[in-house]
Amino acid sequence: MTHTYPFPDPVIIDAEVFTELPAALRRTGQPSYWAEKNRRGAPADSFLEGPSFDVQGNLYFVDIPFGRVFRADPAGDITQVAEYDGQPNGLKIHRDGRIFLADYQNGIMLLDPDTGSMTKALGDADTESFKGCNDLHFGRDGALYFTDQGQTGLQDPSGRIWKWVPETGALSCLIDKVPSPNGLVLDLAEHVLFLAVTRANAVWRLPMSPSGRVNKAGLFIQFSGGRAGPDGLALTSDGGVVVCQTGMGLVWVHDALGRPIAVVRSPRGLGTTNCAFGGPEGRTLFITESDSGSILKAEFSKELGIAGAPMFSGAL
């Protein structure tokens, strides 16, 4: 049944597989500390997260349990870029080309894609350890916003969001009472930070005052069901918010008011963890599907009016 009030039913889009981790890069049968603690020992040959495009159109993404970073070229061929002692969860590329990672174990890391070497960029907050960094997002001025999730949840709503300016070292905590902060993205004007709160099954809206403080934080979207909740976020060119609902195998596309206008369905597993826009005119959404070790893609037509916000805006 189609409803027209208060808004139409969302358009259903079935994603397809863009590429998947080849057998040679899967750690089949190999135990990991991450799987032992997060999967109760159930095997996991990979767990993909953190997709982000460089200016050449290559898609970078991470493998949490085995501390690896991969790169898929525009044809979908995957190369391992790095492997190190860590648990990389999020990855974003600065407009100057530097590649930063949010690492649960180590903090904020910096990757040299030519050598595969990894260096620690920010390991603590004035000697206080982070709970466990999860995802990150750059503002147009180069400031890095990142979530500090750890094991927080409804039982311990003490997750944090940090703002860090790499050039000056200035670090500030924007909010410290979140039950599981995960993906995050700024709105087009960069006055509001949208935040996936996974274990509350919600997306929050965090207005930021000119002084930099978060004021009047509120609930933007409430989900229900599934085995997890909202994970990675992305922004559309007209200010809409894209939400990966991991544990449901869905990615929701909302307009700027939070109304669902489209939903992408996974053809593989339920682990739709994160996403990034790419392709011609930014009209293709690429999604990490962790259950199957795949990268999915969903094509948006011009008629639907959905495209990603510019990736590398702002002057160098």
Image (cartoon, rainbow, N blue to C red):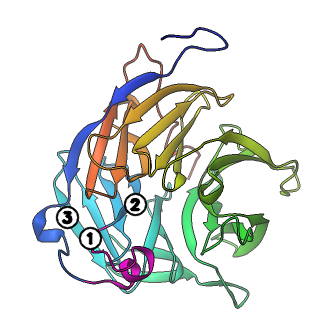
- State the separation of the CA atoms marked 3 and 2: 15 Å
Can residue 17 be spotted in the picture? yes
Residue 75 placement: quadrant: top left
Query: Is the residue 246 above or below the residue 10 in the image?
Result: below
Image quadrant in which you'd find residue 266: top left
Residue at image position (57%, 72%) is 133
Three-letter code for the amino acid on which mark 1 is drawn:
Val
| In this view, the mark in front (1 or 2) | 2
Q: Is residue 125 left or right of residue 250?
A: right
Left or right: 294, with 217 as reference point:
left
In magenta, the rendered stretch is: 31-46
Q: Are marks 1 and 3 in contact (CB under 8 Å)?
A: yes
Residue ID for mark 3: 79
The label on residue 4 is none
Dot 3, crowdedness within 10 Å: few (<14), some or many (≥20)? some
Q: Residue at x 51, y 32 (%)?
A: 253
Q: Which mark is residue 81?
A: 1
| Residue plotted at (11% across, 70% down) | 24
The one nearer the camera, 185 or 246, is 246
First in sequence: mark 1 or mark 2?
2
Could you say which is closer to the camera, residue 70 or residue 181?
Answer: 181
Q: Nearer the viewer, residue 258 or 308?
A: 258
Q: Nearer the viewer, residue 49 or 112?
A: 49
Tag 3, which secondary structure?
strand
Can you tell which of label 3 and label 2 is closer to the viewer? Answer: 2
- The residue under the point 40% across, 60% down is 49
- In reply to whether residue 44 is colored magenta, the answer given is yes
Queried whether the magenta region covers residue 11, the answer comes back as: no
Q: Is residue 315 above or below residue 282?
A: below
Lower position in the chain sequence, tag 3 or tag 2: 2
- Please name the amino acid that badge 3 sits on: Thr
Say which element carries label 1: strand
